Image: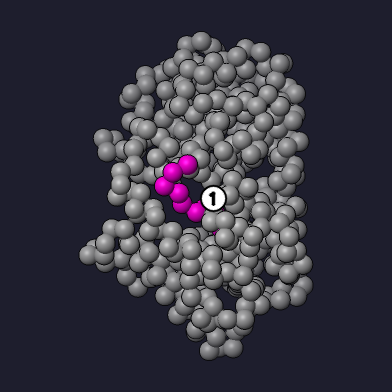
Amino acid sequence: MKVLFIHQNFPGQFRHIAADLAGRPGSELLAIGREQAPGLPGVRLLRYRPHRSPNSGTHPYARTFEDGILHGQQVLRLLLDLKRQGYRPDVVMAHPGWGESLYVKEAFPKARLIHFCEYYYQTQGADAGFDPEFPMDINGAARIRSRNAMHLLSLENCDIGIAPTRWQHSLHPPAYQDKIRIIHEGIDTANLGPDPEAGLKLPDGRILKAGDPVVTYVARNLEPYRGFHTFMRALPRILREHPTCQVVIVGGDDVSYGSRPTDAPNWRTKLLAENPIVQERVHFLGKVPYATYKRVLQISAVHVYLTYPFVLSWSLLEAMASGCLIVGSNTAPVREVIRHGENGLWVDFFDREEIARHVVNALNKPGDFQALRRAAWLSAQDYSLSRGVEAYRRLIHGYDLASV
């Protein structure tokens, strides 16, 4: 079977299924991605870049759509070159979020097109307008409404879609929900888990160990979408009320979602200036290798995960699979995997006092929360790589047409 992957940051969410297929006889894989895509060993990758950026004169509501068209146009050129060379994929698996797969069917009308339906934007009830600190004006709402034009085209064009969670599935228009299967791509639960002997060496040479009072926070980038501002505002009380705890923060200073602060180079700098803390007890590690990240989770006494109603982070599931005690925001993505008092704790996303209270209580009484840690580990097994890859594989081969 010939499978073509299209993802501007390939492999992205397709890493596990692509690696699995690459090792199976009878699979012929090809991938298309932007010039910065990291690629995957064993999978040939064709790189591209749009021939220009959106025109500065394009209406602001339509710039994202024009950008998508430019991505789709450049990918179409690659597809037509492949077609002239005799290439014919059986299945095309694509992330449509940047417009790359808009014209796949013009080149390969008989190929089965599977879309990764990550997010369908809303002007109310999801991430936009959720945080009163960053209000959305009418132009922002109009841009979001217009942005969905590309996603509607993608939903119409694909033969079948995949959404990783029920929450993300629920955001798509009801008319298309029946063609979207709920399949999480999976996390590597087999290589995650509690380790009572785990230790983490800090940049200053100190070593934190499992069992120490360590608060952890992880995000790809430190920004409001993942509640970094609320977490930083809770820290002074946490540090004051538990004078021996240490805090380990993993994440970069870029922006994955939303925008940068207007009065500081990044959110870390801004929030440190606004929230004086004992910096010898708060350790910003930046972006770290996976082995270091894994140890951070294994030494955690309390792991704080906050998010807007948005895409669920792999890091929450990986923290659960590591046996962390989760203090998570009472928002829809978190509620799907964390049940308050059963496998974790909910807190109000905006309530710094409630967050601090739960964290300090957990640090003071670690024995009271062992059952929750164990339950979190068990819950994470439902998101194993083996389950995700098997469901993806069945869908690619056309075996499973029912929601998973």
Closest to the observer, 164 or 256: 164
Query: Total label count?
Result: 1
* Residue at which label 1 appears: 171
- Residue drawn at point x = 70 percent, y = 32 percent: 376
Q: Which residue occupies the extreme front position in the image?
A: 175
Q: State the image coordinates of residue 26 (x, y, percent, origin top left).
A: 75, 75
Does residue 299 appear in the picture of this structure? no
Q: State the image coordinates of residue 145 (x, y, percent, origin top left).
A: 39, 55
Q: State the image coordinates of residue 38 (x, y, percent, origin top left).
A: 52, 60
Quarter occupied by the C terminus: bottom right
Q: State the image coordinates of residue 248 (x, y, percent, origin top left).
A: 52, 28
Q: Does dot 1 land on a helix, a strand or a loop?
A: loop
- Residue drawn at point x = 72 percent, y = 16 percent: 367
* Magenta span: 116-125
118 to 273, vertically: above or below: below
Mark 1 is surrounded, within 10 Å at the Cα level, by few (under 14), some (14 to 19) or many (20 or more) other residues, namely some
In the figure, is residue 291 to the left or right of 196?
Answer: left
Q: Amino acid at mark 1?
A: Leu
Decide whether residue 350 is among the magenta residues: no
Q: Image quadrant of residue 159?
A: bottom right
